Image (spheres, grey):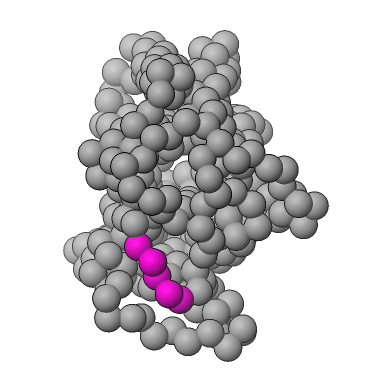
Amino acid sequence: MSTAPASGSIQRLPPRALLMLAVMTLMWGAAWPIMKVGAQEIEIFTFRAAAAFISAFTAFSLARATNSSLRVPRDVRVPLIAAGLLFQGALAFFTTLALTLISSGHAVIIGYTMPLWVVLLGIPILGERPTRLRWLGLALGMVGVALLASRGVELFANAPLGVAAQLAGAVSWAVAVIITKKVRWRMPMDVVLGWQCLIGGIPLAVLAIPELPDLKPVTWMAIGSVLYLGICAQGLGNCVWFRIIDMAPAGVAGVSSLAVPTVGLVLGSLMLDEPVGLIEVTALLLVLGALATVLTLPTFHRRGPETKTTASN
């Protein structure tokens, strides 16, 4: 886990990080339409609990491959539990619920408002003071989300819960990032990720118990969806992301990840035949512009010293 560079420091990603970024972008972007396939056949809590435990096993396996200890220092156990419940518990539930109600393309756009919520929450919690240009970025993002939500009565009249669920997932993700930024973990991030996945998976598994009598045989596509989410997107994808953060400033890495919603939107159209029109493209451009403004422009004014920065998917 790296210390963030001084505000305003903009660097290029090294060649190795660019290759890792390409892999991560495909993993995360493809996860959205693939998750929708699994969520259509498997109950929500069962689906995400299984993926969480698989991703925990993946992260722990990577940690053990480098002879890293899985022990958690006593002073970081509480924030680890909180971040795990939000990052893997609340985010997993709300995202999967949203995918059962709205298209994966719409879900990925709303989901990537997460950095906007990080900025808003960072004001009271981290003492950050965004500039006017940062507020402009927030305004662009909110207009994009509002435009998407106004797609038409025929699209959202029966799915307002889907939009609300995905926004709740984005906020849960943002709170988990805020917690992570404030904590000095003193252990490899593969270990942090593994414990967060395991902790977040436990309440999901408990909530899945009432679903057991309703479980039915599923297709290999649905099983592959769970395996992909657990191993590739949540396991390897997040591990790759933390390595990118170690190799470059978090702001640069964050801006580079903005290709993910584009991949999700395109693959949702190709794989699931989901409609992509002028409104979707306009909303996507507004959100991407907002995130670029929030993540690239310098001038965060902090009250205290620089904090460590990490991010999650």
- Residue 130, placed above or below residue 155: below
Answer whether residue 185 is magenta in the image.
yes
Residue closest to the eye, 276 or 65: 65
The secondary structure making up most of the magenta span is: loop
Q: Residue 231 placed where, x, y %? A: 56, 66
23 in magenta? no
Query: Image point 40% across, 70% down: which residue?
Result: 185
Residue located 29% across and 18% down the image: 157
In the rendered image, residue 275, in percent from the top left (x then y), is placed at 55, 22
Occupied quadrant, residue 232: bottom right
Can you give x and y, in whole percent of width and height, for residue 282 in the image?
A: 54, 14
**Chain part drawn in magenta:** 183-187
Q: Specify whether residue 95 is in view.
A: yes
Front residue (pair 73, 48)? 73
77 shown above or below 163: below
Residue 38 versus residue 230 in the image, above or below: above
